[in-house]
Each structure stands twice: as structure tokens, then as C-alpha cells.
Image (tube, rainbow, N blue to C red):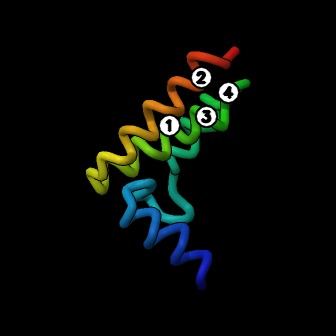
Amino acid sequence: MEMEELCEKMAKEKGYNTTGLEGRNELYEFIQNLVDGDGHALGEIIYKTVRYQRKKDKRDLVKIAAWAYLVYKFGN
């Protein structure tokens, strides 16, 4: 029950996934295809971007910039 709520209700509310637990999860697929080498940092950028889109908290933009700088500076 808790897993369903987390994976369906909360994911939909946060804008991460709207197709439910059994449906296609485009964000997850995107991350799977993207993650390579700098995967964690890139995943954080995606997460913060989705969160910013949903909540419009400008602190997320600063975090996106910080993660992007780390990829620029230290990435493969």
C-alpha cells in the first residue's frame, strides 16, 4: 500500500510520473539512458529541474547550476 502511494500518488503530485505504477515512466527511462560516468550529478540536475518545474523554488536553480559546474569542472 505505501509503495503504491509513493510510486503513484506522490510521483503524480510531484510531476515525476503520471502513468501510474504499471505505466511507462519516461523520467526513469530518460535517466537510465543518460547515466554514464557523471550519472549521479546528471541525475541530480534532472531531479532538481523537475522539482523546479513543479514548485518554482529558485533554490533549485542554484542547485542545478552547482551540479552543472561540477560536471563541467570534473566530468568525463
Q: Amino acid at mark 1?
A: Ile
- Residue that label 4 marks: 38
Of labels 1 and 2, the one closer to you: 2
Query: Is the Cβ of the residue at disc 3 closer than 8 Å to that at disc 1?
Result: yes
Three-letter amino acid code at disc 3? Ala
Q: Which residue is mark 2?
A: 71
What is the secondary structure assignment of the residue under circle 4?
loop
Do the numbered discs 4 and 3 sit on residues whose CB atoms are within 8 Å? yes
Q: Residue at point 54% right, 36% down?
A: 30
Q: CA distance from mark 1 to mark 4?
A: 11 Å
Badge 1 vs badge 2, beta-carbon distance below 8 Å: yes
Classify mark 1: helix, strand or loop.
helix
| Numbered badge on residue 66 | none
User: Going 54% across and 65% down the picture, which residue do you hit?
Assistant: 21
Give the alpha-carbon distance from disc 2 to disc 4, as whole Å.
7 Å
Which residue, given by chain and number where applicable, does mark 1 sit on?
45
Seen in the picture, residue 17 relative to 39 is either above or below; the reply is below
Q: Which quadrant is the C terminus positioned in?
A: top right
